[in-house]
Amino acid sequence: PQSATPDFTGTQGYLRPAPQGVDADFAHQDPRTRGAGIRIVDLEYDWNPFHEDLGFDWSSDLGGDVFPRYTGFADEHGTAVMGELVGRDNGYGVTGGVPDAGMFGISPTRRISETRTSWRPAEAMTYAAQFLDAGDALLIEQQTVGPNGGTRYVPIEWMQSAFDATRLLSDLGITVVATGGNGGENLDAPEFLGRFDRSVRDSGAIVVGAGNSTTRARLGFSV
């Protein structure tokens, strides 16, 4: 029975009023804030479209055979993020921040032969542009190694190709939201060559790091 399905909406603090969340609860009183008519594309390796709180099918995969999903990292992360965005408003599970938006995914791995793929996120982003209009959004769930190497990950636009793809999408009126990366780096440090100084170059992306839910301070692993 439906009532036996757990309800996790009470744990979605990010939808609650400030300072806990962004007060999406209040915004949802205006139906225009629920995402109807907007498409969101998630640049992510894999996701589960059949999750009961999403209710998609594989038509949500825009990459198809050109950008095949990479299943080596499992699908939990992509599925969770899609749930935060468009989880169905159905009285159980979670409810997305923009539950009426259309949700799609595309993998950053490009097929280059019958047996080989290559990580090419900028190509995936430009490929996805054909499915998007001004006012739509692309979410980048990817990071890249910065100038300090190793696991010192930084926003993907450190790569010039990804910066160019982001700028293209931004110029088309598409909102690009990018992860800041988990490398604990200072993007204002000299070795970053001013690439994250908006007076030097600006991709137009909204770059989001991780912060403490109480103090709002940057978490140590985040840029």
Image (spheres, helix red, strand yellow):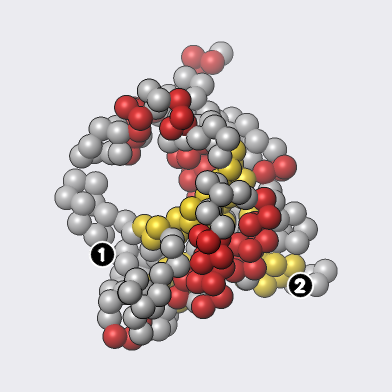
Dot 1, how many residues are within 10 Å of its Cα: few (below 14), some (14-19), or many (20+)?
A: few
Q: Residue beneath label 2, please?
A: 112
Q: Quadrant of residue 109?
A: bottom right
Q: Nearer the viewer, residue 109 or 124?
A: 124
In the shown orientation, is residue 65 left or right of residue 53? Answer: right
Which residue is found at the position 49% from the left and 17% from the top? Answer: 4
Could you tell me how far apart the alpha carbons at marks 2 and 1 are, in whole angstroms? 37 Å
x, y (%) of residue 24? 35, 33
Horizontal and vertical percent position of residue 11: 34, 32
Determine crowd level at label 2: few under 14, some 14-19, many 20+ residues with C-alpha closer than 10 A. few
- Residue 49 falls left or right of residue 10: right
Which comes before the other along the chain, label 2 or label 1?
2
Residue 3 higher or lower than 156, as above or below: above
For the point 82% across and 69% down, the residue is 114
Labels in figure, total: 2
Q: Residue at x 34, y 59 (%)?
A: 209
Amino acid type, callout 2: Ile
Q: Is residue 135 above or below residue 3?
A: below
| Amino acid on which the number 1 mark rests in the picture | Gly
Q: Circle 1 is placed at which residue position?
A: 220
